[in-house]
Image (cartoon, helix red, strand yellow):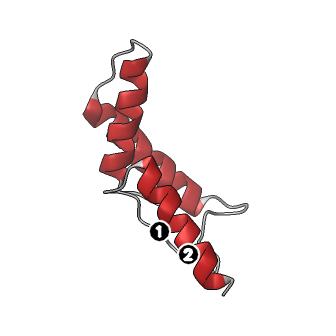
Amino acid sequence: LTASAEERTRRRMAEYEAKGLHADFEELLREVNLRDEQDKNRAVAPLRKAGDAVELDSTCMDAEEVLAAIETIVKERNA
């Protein structure tokens, strides 16, 4: 499951706003990109997609659409 850095930043901003917190979009985006880079390049267990993984980009999807897509993928793989 993935989404663009910009979309993940928008989602985090919404979480902050729901808690009554303020955050700067550009600063959060830099943090998201930095964490992505650190996760991909760490010495132990770097973040990589498994060879048999199915990648689902949820950038333009809401939670219900993501769930429906995952259910479809599971059904297709188990058919």
Q: Amino acid at mark 2?
A: Ile
Mark yes or no: residue 1 visible. Answer: no
Q: Position of residue 25 (x, y in %)?
A: 27, 32
Residue at left 30%, top 48%? 6
Earlier residue among tags 1 and 2: 1
Residue type at the position of mark 1:
Leu
Q: On screen, 76 above or below 49?
A: below
Residue position for label 1 = 56
Instruction: Quadrant for residue 30, please give it.
Output: top left
* Cα–Cα span, label 1 and label 2: 9 Å
Apparent side of residue 34 relative to residue 61 in the rendered image (left or right): right
Residue nearer the viewer, 77 or 48: 77
| Extreme residue in the right direction | 44
Q: Quick check: 34 left or right of 30? A: right
> What residue is shown at x 50% (from left), y 47% (from top)?
35
* 79 sits left or right of 72 in the view: right
Outermost residue on the bottom side: it is 79
Is the C-beta separation of discs 1 and 2 under 8 Å? yes
Residue drawn at (31%, 57%) of the image: 60
Residue 43 visible somewhere in the drawing: yes
Residue 44 position by quadrant: bottom right
Q: Secondary structure at mark 2?
A: helix
Is the residue 11 above or below the residue 4 in the image?
A: above
Labels 1, 2: front one? 2
Instruction: Name the residue beneath numbered marker 2.
Output: 73
Task: List x then y, in percent, for residue 33.
Answer: 40, 49
Assign the C terminus to one quadrant of the image: bottom right
